[in-house]
Image (cartoon, rainbow, N blue to C red):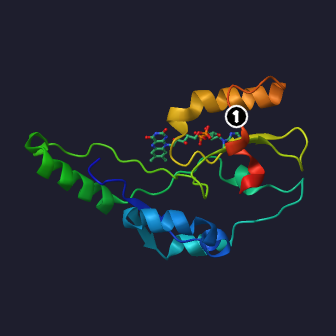
Amino acid sequence: MTQRGALDAPLTLDHLLIGWRYLSQLRAQYSFLRPSLGKAFVKDLGVARRWKANDVSPFEKIRVNDPAVNPSLNQEAFTNLRNAWLVFNNAEIDEEWAGIIDVTPDSNPVIDKIKAIPGLTVATGFSGHGFGTGSAAGQLAADLVSGDEPIIDPSPYRFDRL
Ligand SMILES: Cc1cc2nc3c(=O)[nH]c(=O)nc-3n(C[C@H](O)[C@H](O)[C@H](O)COP(=O)(O)OP(=O)(O)OC[C@H]3O[C@@H](n4cnc5c(N)ncnc54)[C@H](O)[C@@H]3O)c2cc1C
């Protein structure tokens, strides 16, 4: 609220490889982003993009994404909070936390069976709306897995639209 959605956006290899798919989002939301080029780019170059079935995948190496906090962004938000509501003048930040938001080019999730890998159904790419939509998304994923009539039209969430 006190940042109007400001987000750190450390550049990685994928920004170069598939960033063009996000151009319309970039135009609409550029003012929220704080892009940077640094350690994240170099670290990302070392992440495997393909692996054999018996190899340890990146998903086993990194079970939980736990990015470092950007204290200056939080401090900025805190200053805005104090300026807007004087009651917070004597407040202090007790704990800080940062997370990663996965975003698809159209901001809709992918909830679909993956034809190339029979038996695999994915529900991902919630684009910062996975709490709110979680229950319905889970129901749709369950319907697809069990072969039941989907509760909603699943076509906006097809994997092959991207
Ligand atoms: C800062 C921030 C603010 C957000 N604000 C909102 C909001 O206001 N409203 C909203 O609707 N959404 C919000 N979201 C988005 C929401 O948090 C996500 O969309 C949602 O949590 C995604 O749910 P998920 O189940 O797909 O993934 P996750 O919640 O990431 O769950 C994946 C789980 O899988 C586990 N896992 C990973 N790899 C493995 C493995 N190899 N083996 C076993 N387990 C594994 C992880 O530990 C994790 O528990 C926000 C996200 C962030 C980061």
**160 sits left or right of 103 in the view:** right
- The percent position of residue 101, horizontal first and vertical second, equals 52, 52
**How many numbered discs sit on the rendered protein?**
1
Q: Is residue 58 left or right of residue 53?
A: left
Residue 57 in picture, x, y percent from top left? 78, 55
Q: Name the residue: 66% across, 69% down.
A: 18
Q: Residue 85 versus residue 51: which sits nearer the camera?
A: 85
> Which quarter of the picture shows residue 135?
top right
Q: Give residue 20's position: percent from left, percent from top.
A: 62, 72
Q: Give coordinates of residue 144: x percent, y percent.
A: 79, 31
Q: Amino acid at mark 1?
A: Asp
Q: Which residue is mark 1?
A: 153
Left or right of 88, for residue 27: right
SS at mark 1 in the image: loop
Mark 1 vs ligand 1: CB below 8 Å: no
Asked whether 37 or 146 is in front, the reply is 146
* Residue drawn at 80 percent across, 55 percent down: 56
| Residue drawn 44% across the image and 63% down it | 28
Q: Ligand 1 shows up in which quadrant of the image?
A: top right
Along the horizontal axis of the image, is 11 left or right of 16?
left
Where 149 falls versus 39 (above or below)?
above
Quadrant (top left/top right/bottom left/bottom right) for the C terminus: bottom right
Q: State whether residue 4 is above or below residue 22.
A: above
- Between 114 and 14, the residue placed more toward the observer is 114
Which residue appears at 43% of the width and 62% of the height? 29
Q: Nearer the viewer, residue 43 or 152?
A: 152
Residue 155, placed above or below residue 5: above
Q: Tag 1: Cα neighbours inside 10 Å, few (<14), some, or many (≥20)?
A: few
